[in-house]
Image (cartoon, grey):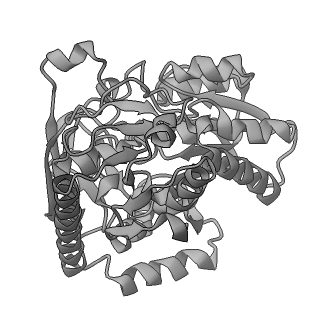
Amino acid sequence: MNYPKHHLVKTGYIVCCQVCDSRKLHIILDLGYQPLCDSLLTKEKLNEPEKTYPLRMMWCENCTLVQIDYCVSGEEVYHPDYPYRSGITKELAQYQESMASSLVKEFNLQQNDLVIDVGSNDGTLLKGFKKLGINVLGIEPTNIAKIANKSGIRTVQAFFDIKTAKEIKKKYGNASLIITTNTFAHMQTLGEFIMGAYYLLKDEGVFVNETHYLLDVIKGGQFDTIYHEHLRTYSLKSLIALFGQYDFTVTDVARGDRYGGNIRVYATKGKGKKVSPQVSKLLRLEKGFGLDKLETFKKFATRVKKARLEFMDFLIKTKMTGKSIVGNSCPGRCSTLLNYYGVDSELLPYLAEQPTSLKLNMYLPGKHIPVVNNQRLIDEQPDYVVILAWHYAKPIMEQLKIRGLKSDFVIPLPDFKIVKNLKV
C-alpha cells in the first residue's frame, strides 16, 4: 500500500494542505523570519551568522488543519545535540507515568505485548510501561537515545520510516500498541510514519498519537506553539481526514491539559472498526466553536497582536522605572514568543532554567538571551519573573515561592497578566 505523495512534505515552501492537499489555505499570522527554536547557541556561535526561516500560520478551509508554509529539513531541526529531555520536567514525567498506566488498563496489555514509543526521547513514557512488566521499545533519532539506553530503556537511534519499521518487525515482532507524543505534528515523512506504524502493528493493533489540539490553541491564544518543529496543528476533523487515506479507523479520542491543551487520538488498524461516541461529540464541538470558519482565526490573530502590545508596553515601562525583570524557563515555544515580540537581552537579561536542563549556559536562538541556572532568581530576587512555560505557570510559581522567591510573576499568555507573589 502506497501513501499519497503530499504526505511526504518537501523541504521549502509549501503551497498545499499537508493533510488533504487542498490549495484553500489562508494566512492567519505572520511571525516573521525566525531561527529554529531548539538550535540554541554556544558563546562561540554568537559571533557567526545565524539561519532564519519564514514562520507563517496557515489554515486549511477544507479539513481545518493549521500548518506552517515553510518546511525545514528534519535532519537540521532534530540535530544529534537536540536539547530537549522529557524526564526533567516533573509534571510531564508524572503525566507520562499516568498515561502508561491508563493505556495498560485500557487495552489489557500483558507481558508478551510489545509497546513502541516513536520519538521516545529519554524513555520517560516507556518507563511507566516497563514498571508494569510490559515489553517496550523506543525509537529516537537524536543522541538522547543514548541516555534512554543507559537508563535501561531499550531504544533504537533512528528516524522512523517504513524501512526502520520493517527492520524492527523482523527483530522484535509486531506491536500491540504504538504511541507517539508531541511528535506526530513534527515529521515531514507523514506517510512513511503512518505506513511504518501499519506494518509494525498487529491486526486490530492501535496507533495512539497525542499532540497540541487546535481548538485549545485558538481558544487560548497560543500562537507560541507555532514553530518550525510543528509543521501541523491538528483538529480532530483533520486527523480523521488524514487516517481516512489509509487502512485505519479513528476509533476514539480524548482531550487533556498537557501543553496547554492536547488531543489524544486512537487509530485502529483496519477500516470499519467500532467508533466511540466521543468522536462525533468532539466533531460537533469543533464545528460549534467555529474551527471551520475563517472569522474564528481572524479574531485569534487580533488577540495575539493585543497580547504582544500589552507585554511590550509593560516590559518597556518596567525597565524605564528602573525595576528588574527576567525570564523563567526556556521551552521551544518561548523562542517563537520572544522573537515575534522582539525581546532581547537588553529587555530580558536572562532566562532561568532548572539545574538539570541541557540548555544551561546556552543562548536563545535569534535574540541571544543567556540561559542560566534558576538559583540565580533566588539569589538576585528580581522585581518580576516572566513565566515563559506559562502552561505550567501554577506549579512553577509555587515551587519558586517555596524556594524563597519573593518576585511578582508575569504570565504572557493566553492573555497578559501579573500575579502578585502574595497571591500564589
Is 167 rendered above or below residue 165? above
Q: Quadrant of residue 72?
A: top left
Residue 113: x %, y % from top left = 80, 39
Q: Residue at x 58, y 49 (%)?
A: 404
**17 relative position to 189: left or right:** left
- Number of residue marks: 0
Could you say which is closer to the camera, residue 225 or residue 280? Answer: 225
Q: Quadrant of residue 305?
A: bottom left
Q: Quadrant of the N terminus?
A: top left
**152 relative position to 148: left or right:** right
Q: Quadrant of residue 395?
A: bottom right
Q: Quadrant of the C terminus?
A: bottom right
Q: Residue at x 32, y 76 (%)?
A: 291
Residue 214: x %, y % from top left = 38, 65
Q: Residue at x 59, y 42 (%)?
A: 89
Residue 107: x %, y % from top left = 78, 55
Residue 3 seen: no
Residue 281 seen: yes
Outermost residue, bottom direction? 288
Q: Residue at x 63, y 52 (%)?
A: 402
**301 relative position to 192: left or right:** left
Residue 209: x %, y % from top left = 54, 51
Outermost residue, top direction? 44
Is 303 rendered above or below residue 265? below
